Image: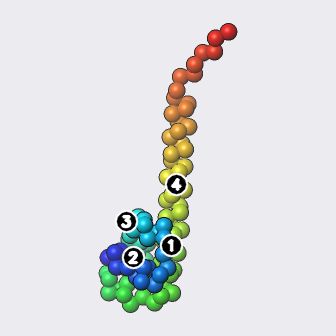
Amino acid sequence: MSDFAFFRFVSLNILSEEEKKSKDEIISVTEQVLDAKGIECDSKISKLSEEKIREILNEVRKKRRKLTREEREEEDDEERKKELEEPISKVSD
């Protein structure tokens, strides 16, 4: 289903080059957005206006940015935790 939505994004030429290269991620996030909107089949996607497709892509971009931000925060938290768990080396007098 989301492959078709991705195809609509591409055919309308509304994806950035980076988004085109991140096809699997865009499809995954699009699936989440479409599920939240109750859009469950290609026939519904094919009937959506360009404006609605653009709205969906904007939601995909927001969700993707949020997921990326959360992943970075998790990585930072893990690094801080590792730093705290490392033994403090003794300084020789």
Query: Residue 3, located in which quarter of the rendered image?
Result: bottom left
Label placed on residue 24: 3
Residues at marks 1 and 3, CA–CA distance in whole angstroms = 14 Å
Residue 39 position within the rendered picture, expressed as x and y whole percent measured from the top left: 38, 80
The amino acid sitting under disc 2 is Phe
Q: Earlier in the sequence, mark 2 or mark 1?
A: 2
Circles 2 and 4: CB atoms closer than 8 Å: no
Circles 4 and 1: CB atoms closer than 8 Å: no
- Pointer 1 residue: 16
- Pointer 4 residue: 70
Residue 41 position within the rendered picture, expressed as x and y whole percent measured from the top left: 31, 81
Side of 47 relative to 57 (left or right): left
Q: Earlier in the sequence, mark 2 or mark 3?
A: 2
Q: Secondary structure at mark 4?
A: helix
Q: Nearer the viewer, mark 4 or mark 1?
A: 1
Q: Earlier in the sequence, mark 4 or mark 1?
A: 1
Residue 36 position within the rendered picture, expressed as x and y whole percent measured from the top left: 42, 73
Residues at marks 4 and 1, CA–CA distance in whole angstroms = 22 Å
Label placed on residue 6: 2
Who is closer to the viewer here, 24 or 65? 24
Who is closer to the viewer here, 9 or 41? 9
Q: Earlier in the sequence, mark 3 or mark 4?
A: 3
Identified at 38% across, 90% down, the residue is 47
Identified at 55% across, 44% down, the residue is 76
Who is closer to the viewer here, 28 or 10? 10
Q: Secondary structure at mark 1?
A: loop
Query: How many numbered dots are placed on residues in this image?
Result: 4
Q: Nearer the viewer, mark 3 or mark 4?
A: 3
